[in-house]
Image (cartoon, grey):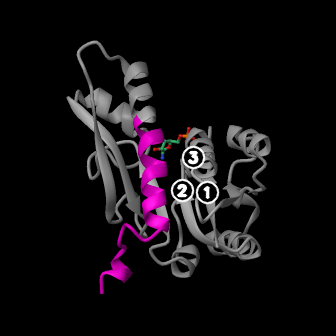
Amino acid sequence: MSIAVFASGSGSNFERLVEVSRDQKWPVPIRLLVCDKPGAKVLERAERLGIPAVCVSPKTFADKAAYETFVLAELDKHGIEWIVLAGYMRLIGSTLLDAYPWRIVNIHPSLLPAFPGKDAIGQAFAYGVKVSGVSVHLVDEEMDTGPLLAQVPVLLEEDDDLESFTTKIHQAEHRLYPEVVYRWITGAIKTPDMKG
Ligand code: GRF
């Protein structure tokens, strides 16, 4: 049993998850990084942390199903049971969803259902909200819509600019995500299939 993290960009959440899972000696280790952006910074982090990475561009496959069938084979090889999306900029298709029912989780930098999609931090800042935050949710077939597992608020204060607000959101993500993933993989959070 192990966890794969999927990421497309910087990978700060990936790194934090690996560090916390090692420090806390999680019963289910993070064993694989799946990346869809060759050259992404997250690959350097995986190398430094000694986590094997699979990185292929979906463009090299005929369609999403073919790409996900390839990814699925890699997940099988590594005995992956849980998928953690951390800045993975791609909608998960039915091939992976069917193979991992309620076993895929995502983090989003807003209080969903507000500001779904790209640049949620910038959207919330431009709107002039007084409070935004971070959401962790199970993944379904649509973008940022699955059942919520946890949320934390982050205040946008008078003296915040976009940069300081972004930093606060990322700090909240780095605190919340490892805690929620741990509770999810250890069964402390009930998923819809467990609620009967
Ligand atoms: C995070 O803000 C996450 O909520 C969003 O993408 C960003 C990824 O950041 N889905 P990083 O690559 O983990 O630094």
Is there a contact, CB below 8 Å, between mark 2 and mark 1? yes
Q: Does dot 3 land on a helix, a strand or a loop?
A: helix
Question: Mark 2: is the Cβ under 8 angstroms from ligand 1?
Answer: yes
Cα–Cα span, label 3 and label 1:
14 Å
Magenta span main SS: helix
Q: Magenta residues?
A: 172-196
Q: Residues within 10 Å of mark 3 (few under 14, many from 20)?
A: some
Q: Earlier in the sequence, mark 2 or mark 1?
A: 1
In the picture shown, does residue 12 fall above or below 116? above
Q: Earlier in the sequence, mark 3 or mark 2?
A: 3
Residue in view at x 76 percent, y 57 percent = 56
Could you tell me the amino acid type at mark 3?
A: Val
| Left or right placement of residue 23 versus residue 193 in this view | right
Query: How far across and how far down the image is residue 135, in percent?
Result: 35, 50
Tag nearer the camera, 3 or 2: 3
| Left or right placement of residue 21 versus residue 167 in this view | right
Query: How far across and how far down the image is residue 117, in percent?
Result: 40, 48
Task: Give the labeled residue for mark 2.
Answer: 85
Q: Is residue 193 magenta?
A: yes
Query: How far across and how far down the image is residue 49, in percent?
Result: 74, 44
Is there a contact, CB below 8 Å, between mark 3 and mark 2? no
